[in-house]
Image (spheres, rainbow, N blue to C red):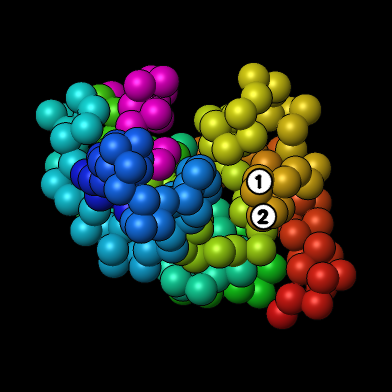
Amino acid sequence: MDENSHEMISNLKAYLEYLKGMGIVPLPVAENIPEKVIRSETLTLAEVRKELGDCKRCKLHRTRRTIVFGEGNEKATLMFIGEGPGYDEDVQGRPFVGKAGQLLTKIIQSINLSREEVYIANIIKCRPPQNRNPEPDEIESCSPFLMKQITSIHPKIICALGTFSAQTLLKTDAKITALRGKLYDLEGVKVIPTYHPAFLLRNPERKREVWEDMKKIVEWLSNNNIA
Ligand code: URA
């Protein structure tokens, strides 16, 4: 539900309560419409994309070329979430298509899956200038859309790639070295952080740990009878 609809429902509720206060009682007004009920609507990915529109909610819209929404299987059981688009992604409008992306593709293939079978997205959808780190206001503006994508896809497990992804999804300041390889819960969806492929390009000796984390994903899916 977009902000306007949400505001409309709040106004309507307030009006109905006003009428009730005036003694006009036949209108059925629940004492408390739980926020969760109002917000729990699941949109299709196309609807989320439409709601995002030509987003200008944060300053990154001034320097981006394209919005990198995410791509893959709309019903994926496994989702990969990175940090944000880099140069190649900004040009092509697709996530993880540069050097780090090529490594991510190999990581996905190492567990006998293809990019088309999983869903790939980022914490932020627009490239920060000079690939600087995303800033808190940018993450704050963008993450509701990622959350709607997660709700829509309803994956069983999310692999958080790198510090920003893991820290944002898990709402923690802990270091990626401490977070990686463990399973966490995000509103019923498992989250397993691992190193970002760009970090692996600079530190290839850490690939073994990512391989261990991928094996954990496969093991968790198989223990939970998910193909
Ligand atoms: N790094 C990311 O975090 N995401 C991309 O899409 C590309 C590089």
- In the image, what residue occupies the spot 16% across and 35% down? 56
User: Would you say the residues marked 2 and 1 are in contact, meaning their CB atoms lie under 8 Å apart?
Assistant: yes
Circle number at residue 130: none
Q: Nearer the viewer, residue 172 or 104?
A: 172
Can residue 147 be seen by looking at this rendering? yes
Q: Is residue 100 above or below residue 166?
A: below
Classify residue 133 by image quadrant. Answer: top left
Residue placed under numbered mark 1 in the picture: 186
In the rendered structure, which segment of residues is drawn in magenta?
A: 130-144
- Amino acid type assigned to the residue bearing label 1 in the image: Leu
Q: Is residue 169 above or below residue 72?
A: above
- In the image, what residue occupies the spot 64% across and 34% down? 170
Q: Is residue 69 above or below residue 84?
A: below
Q: In the image, residue 29 lies at what x, y percent?
A: 41, 51
The kind of secondary structure the magenta stretch mainly shows is helix
As drawn, which residue projects farthest toward the right?
A: 223
Circle number at residue 189: 2
Q: CA distance from mark 2 to mark 1?
A: 5 Å
Residue 94 magenta? no
Screen quadrant of the C terminus: bottom right
Q: Secondary structure at mark 2?
A: strand
- Amino acid type assigned to the residue bearing label 2 in the image: Val
- In the image, what residue occupies the spot 44% across and 71% down? 74
Q: Is mark 2 within 8 Å of ligand 1?
A: no
Could you tell whether 211 is left or right of 202 in the image?
Answer: right
Residue 143 magenta? yes
Q: In the image, residue 194 lies at what x, y percent?
A: 67, 42
- In the image, what residue occupies the spot 36% across and 57% down? 26
Could you tell whether 206 is left or right of 59 in the image?
Answer: right
Q: Nearer the viewer, residue 208 or 140?
A: 140
Q: In the image, residue 172 lies at what x, y percent?
A: 65, 25
Q: Nearer the viewer, residue 75 or 70?
A: 75
